[in-house]
Image (tube, rainbow, N blue to C red):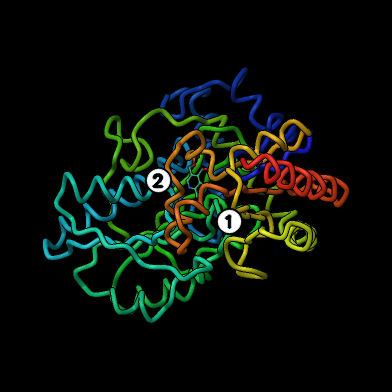
Amino acid sequence: MIFLDAAATTPVRREVIEAMFPYLTGDFGNPSSHHELGERAALAIGRARSDIAELLDCRPGEVVFTSGGTEADNLAVKGIALARRAARASRNRVLISALEHPAVQESAEYLARMHGFQLETIPVDRSGLIDGDIFSSMLDDDVALASVMYANNEIGTVQPIAELAALAAQHGVPLHSDAVQASGWLALKLPALGVHALSISGHKFGAPKGVGALILRSRTLAEPVIHGGGQQSGLRSGTENVAFAVALAKALQLAEQEREAAFERVSRLRDDFIDSVLSRVPQAVLTGARGAQRLPSIASFCFPGTHGESVLLELERQSIICSSGSACAAGSSEPSAVLLAIGLSAEVAQSAVRFSLPSAVSAEELAQAADAVVAAVRNLGRLGR
Ligand code: PLP
């Protein structure tokens, strides 16, 4: 099998399993317990928090462990918007980019539907990029929160987050960024990015599914979304998942160590793969930006005249695993909102195929995948599918 669906998920790394194993077995304590077993668990959580803080250049108290990227996005969007409006009633607008993952999009829609916020969409150009002047023109002191993802999961476009955060700051608006797809590929140092909140998810870089974090900068107001026993400074109640917190820290540490080399190597392989497909499949259209404004791991195309799901099945018959869009939208007959937002027609959007490359992908695997794509699209074209 050639696995080119790493944006959907990645396997858990052996070192990560080894790091978390003690906290699933002998050291199984509850970090809130006042005995030695509990204290050992609390120490482990504390170490995981400090390790993540060091890697992301933030304070340990700014790391909130969550059940994944979805919960981190919910906490950021709902938590910050509700807290800032509670502090000043005129902050009633929420701005999100046109490319957001449903975790952000649906959270923002919930705020509009249930709490009367005014939801506005920040437009993007044909590559999926936000224009700083347009973003700036939408900012004012009545904005409770802006949310712009760092790198898109379907088309790989990377936003100029530091520039957008600086513009937001000029108007006193906090910027949240969903960095779930950026982690492992792009630098995530909080001071350089300048964002007030950043979401990450472990299963995209070698930790298990079901763990993530929201980095919430101190002095950023936020209401909890999950209420209970007041763990994690009241921001996220519930007994901490010690083993998974340890796993998240270990996976992030490994990903950071390997990040720059992986960026260089995979960017080159991605470009060769894109060029090979574009030069050999006449109707292929690349979606998203090129070069540095594209995640190294994402090669996304439309093949007008085919259906993305049919291309996917043809490729799977040849043991090449990819996706017709994001994993969350898989199986949905609706065209991708991201592809519509960059100006594609519904018909072209239905022909989308996304290849997302794991960091260990080889040139041989991609050469084989390119040959298979050429054959699959040619076959489907002949059959009128
Ligand atoms: N945000 C983005 C950009 C994603 O790609 C994903 C998952 O695919 C999520 C959020 C959700 O993360 P999780 O699967 O950890 O809930």
Q: Residue 39 or 19: which is nearer the viewer?
A: 19
Q: Which marked residue is nearer to the observer: mark 2 or mark 1?
A: 2
Q: Is residue 42 left or right of residue 246?
A: left
Query: Which residue is situated farthest in the left direction here?
Result: 89
Q: Does the residue labelled 2 lie within 8 Å of ligand 1?
A: no
The amino acid at mark 2 is: Pro
The image position of residue 323, as x and y in percent, is 61, 41
The image position of residue 69, as x and y in percent, is 47, 43
Q: Is residue 20 above or below residue 304?
A: above
Residue hosting label 1 = 182
Say which quadrant the N terminus sits in.
top right
Q: Distance between the residues labelled 2 and 1?
A: 17 Å
Residue hosting label 2 = 102
The image position of residue 87, as x and y in percent, is 16, 59
Query: Which residue is situated farthest in the right direction here?
Result: 364
Which residue is depicted at the point 48% across and 40% down?
Answer: 329
Say which quadrant the C terminus sits in.
top right
Q: Is residue 61 visible?
A: no
Q: Is residue 7 above or below residue 265?
A: above
Q: Do the residues labelled 2 and 1 touch (CB within 8 Å)?
A: no
Q: Is residue 195 above or below residue 313?
A: below
Q: Can residue 85 be seen in this view?
A: yes
Q: Residue 364 or 351: which is nearer the viewer?
A: 351
Q: Is residue 373 left or right of residue 243?
A: right
